[in-house]
Amino acid sequence: MGKGQEVLDRRVYGAGEVIFKEGEVGRRCAYLVQSGKVEISKTSGQGEVTILGHITEGGIFGEMALIDNHTRMAMARALEPTAVVIITEAVFEDKLRKADPFIRALLNIFVRNIRETTQRLVNRP
């Protein structure tokens, strides 16, 4: 394999299959939807499930774990047969190394703000 070539990991999930769980510590990666539909949901401290959104073809989810290395803040579940390409930590880090340090710092701030805002919205009385 020549320099600069990247091996992409592709996965297919069945309808209803969990891609990752909220609070999960695991593989630092993001997902690019090739086909299908993914539901992102979060459970409040009181056990209520809030749907945060749906990701369809061309959308990316799970990216915050790549940036701040925290646990998954929500659950991702395929709503229908769904194919995803996995964006690995190595690929992301390679691209991030080439970015301006200011941009890297902004990404960290954005992710922290998103995590805090989502937590407040889901757990409000």
Image (cartoon, helix red, strand yellow):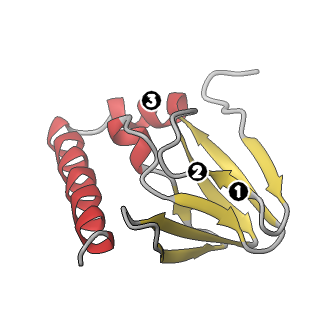
Residues at marks 1 and 3 touching, judged by CB atoms closer than 8 Å:
no
Is residue 35 found left or right of 102 in the rendered image? right
Which comes sooner in the sequence, label 1 or label 3?
A: 1
Residue under numbered circle 1: 18
Residue 4 in percent (x, y) is at: 60, 28
Quarter of the image with the C terminus is bottom left
Secondary structure under tag 2 reads loop
**Disc 2 from disc 3: Cα separation:** 26 Å
Give the amino acid at mark 2: Lys
Q: Which of the labelled discs sits on residue 122, or is there none?
A: none
Which residue is found at the position 38% from the left and 34% from the top? Answer: 69
Residue under numbered circle 3: 94
Q: Quadrant of residue 13?
A: bottom right
Residue under numbered circle 2: 21
Is residue 77 found left or right of 124 in the rendered image? right
Residue 44 in percent (x, y) is at: 39, 66
Q: Callout 3: few (<14), some (14-19), or many (20+) C-alpha neighbours within 10 Å?
A: few
Give the amino acid at mark 1: Val
**Disc 1 from disc 2: Cα separation:** 7 Å
Relative to the observer, which residue lies in front, 111 or 7?
111
Residues at marks 1 and 2 touching, judged by CB atoms closer than 8 Å:
yes
